[in-house]
Amino acid sequence: MPDGSATAHLYRPKLATVLVEGYNLGYFRNDLLAALTVAIVALPLSMAIAVASGVSPERGLYAAVVGGFLVSALGGSRYQIGGPAGAFIVIVAATVAKFGLDGLLLTVFLSGFMLTLIGLLRLGSLIRYIPHAVTVGFTCGIAVTIFASQIKDLGGLKLPAAEPGQLLPKLAMLGQALPTMSPAAFAIGAGSAALIFLLRSLLPNWPGMLIAVVLASLAAWLLRLPVETIGSHFGRLPDGWPAFRWPVISSSSVLEVLPAAFSFTLLGAVESLLSAKVADGMTGRKHRYNMELVAQGIANVASAVFGGISVTGTIARTATNIRAGARSPVSGMAHAVLVLLFMLVAMPLASFIPLSALAGVLTVVCWNMAEKEEFLRLLHGWRSASVLIATFGLTLVEDLTFGIVAGCALAAVFAVIERVTSELKRSSM
């Protein structure tokens, strides 16, 4: 069977290719089992990402449903799972803090159009050439920043003022608030993270995140622990599907959020193609990069009009999908339907989830996200180390876009110097 390399440039969803090749009941059974596995992972993770991003948990579920369905139905990968991703927490939270929910939805909406345009202009192949050191640097930087943003909920800290967005002021305020730590909240959060790690080591096929969140919720409710929950923080959660609503669009609002939309677009393109590339490595197949970006763009536009946060390809859920035996994009579409069924039937149960348990889930996500071994390996070469440290440091102290641009610029300078040096050596021989 061909691996798809010959058709990687086509604008044809992989779903269409699968249906033309032949799709049978056995494939559907495998896809359905994989969908159930991915949905179990996506449920707590989507809510945790939304809460950490500064919005209510159902916004993450909206993105999981819309993104999961459209990315799989229209995308260029057989196995890609779309939805909210931890990498976006920092820039989503910053956008909400600066422009409010309406500004965030407009940003996601514009970013969707930009992603679609990048795909239609066949620029997907260029994004794939971002230096590896830059990718590792900003990924590790995001992981550190996300963990810092979870310390408050993890320990149940009471801050004297709004939590700063910048890392250093944030850490300073968190340090001052340490005496207000809640032992119950920390026990729930740290216990949830420890249980996930333990289950992953002993029973890797079990849904560790869901088990940890359910047990934490039961413990908090049965023992009447004084911890903040989704219900106490956000009030009653909607248990239906939101109405279609266009973002509030004006020339002034578009100009205001445009820089943020560029950041969303850059990160969305890199994350999605990186995830699809990981899926290729696990399966021996090739994704259609431009078609994938078009699908990601459409998914973000749709997520915004239904009130969801940003959508991208998710590496952990995509890998889970493959390991669970998925055979086609139908698994991703089915996982979205299963998440939707939870929203319609069991959404009130989410009110009992402690925020510290979700912080524990994201602590695990941060640990897994940080490419620790690659970070140390890249430090051995002075050029790769310079690019890595520049990207990592600037992502921490400035922002993601600044870190990526600076890292790519530095890598380009090194590449030009190396090219000129080699040409001079060749001409002197």
Image (cartoon, rainbow, N blue to C red):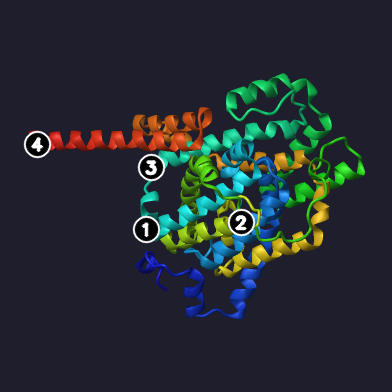
Determine whether label 3 and label 1 are within 8 Å by CB.
no
Q: Disc 3 or 4, which lies upstream in sequence? A: 3
Question: Mark 2 to mark 4: distance in Å?
Answer: 61 Å
Secondary structure beneath disc 3?
Answer: loop
Question: Mark 2 to mark 3: distance in Å?
Answer: 37 Å
CA neighbours of label 2 inside 10 A, class few (<14), some (14 to 19), many (20+): some
- Residue at (64%, 27%) from the top-left corner? 164
Q: Disc 3 or 1, which lies upstream in sequence? A: 1
CA neighbours of label 1 inside 10 A, class few (<14), some (14 to 19), many (20+): few
Q: Disc 2 or 3, which lies upstream in sequence? A: 3
Does residue 429 appear in this view?
no
Q: Disc 2 or 4, which lies upstream in sequence? A: 2
Question: Mark 3 to mark 4: distance in Å?
Answer: 28 Å
Which label lies toward us, 2 or 4? 2
Amino acid type for the residue under numbered disc 2? Trp
Farthest front residue?
251
Secondary structure beneath disc 1?
Answer: loop
Q: Mark 4 points at which residue?
A: 427
Q: Name the residue under label 3.
A: 131
Q: From the top left corner, tell me how far across and down residue 367 is, in percent.
A: 60, 39
Question: Mark 1 to mark 2: distance in Å?
Answer: 26 Å
Between 344 and 257, the one nearer to me in the picture = 257
| Residue 121 marker | 1
Amino acid type for the residue under numbered disc 4? Ser
